[in-house]
Image (cartoon, rainbow, N blue to C red):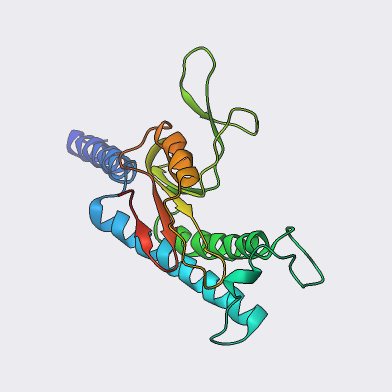
Amino acid sequence: MPAATRAGQVLQKAGQVAEVIQGFLYVSKFLDEAQKKHAEDIIVECVKEAHFKVEEDLFGKGKTLPATDCKKPPSVEKKLAPTWAQHLGKLKHAMAFECIQQRLAEKFPNNFSIEPRYRREEFTNDLMLTDRWVGSKQPDVVLHFTRNATRIQCIYELKFPCGNEQSNPWSGEVQQQLALYKALGGECEPVIVTPQLEISRQP
């Protein structure tokens, strides 16, 4: 084989390797600000759609549950929880998760997880995924480093106020919950997402 031909093949292979490395470096990262904003818009859209779709299916178009009924047992055949507030919350979370999974998978398939469960390794304190409930934390939606859910970028907790009640989303209980999520680490502060206020950051 002529030397020029061998040299050409070596250069071609080197170029292919360089392209693979460059591609890996390109995709293995956190989302940039524009991508993160796009992901957040998708999460908000799904939360709103889930809220209004569940309300419409149960109560009719443009109608909602009176706040006075939120603590009453749900008047449906298949009860998911003892109160309307909890029942609606479960339905809306399930629908929002399905929507988020489908739409984020189209744009950022390797940079998000839905309901990952985390705990700290006992001896090293390293963050790890687990199926152990005791001592673990399970945020709703996590943006993270490519193919690495333990390198957290941002945490989003979905909240669905019941019916037409107007409550402060940043209750003491919610603040405590997100403080625990903050302790998991991340590039940004954990936030809550509601159909009314969209992305809500702690005041």
Left or right, 126 with reference to 31: right
Question: In this view, which residue lies farthest toward the right?
Answer: 77
Q: x, y (%) of residue 179?
A: 42, 37
Q: Is residue 57 above or below residue 15?
A: below
Question: In this view, which residue lies farthest toward the front?
Answer: 68
Q: x, y (%) of residue 95?
A: 59, 66
Asked whether the viewer can see residue 150, the reply is no
State the residue at coordinates (45%, 37%). 181
Left or right, 69 with reference to 140: right
Left or right, 16 with reference to 108: left
Frontmost residue, 78 versus 162: 162
Residue 134 falls in which quadrant of the image? top right
Residue 190 falls in which quadrant of the image? top left
Q: x, y (%) of residue 191?
A: 38, 50
Asked whether the viewer can see residue 40, the reply is yes
Question: In this view, which residue lies farthest toward the top?
Answer: 123
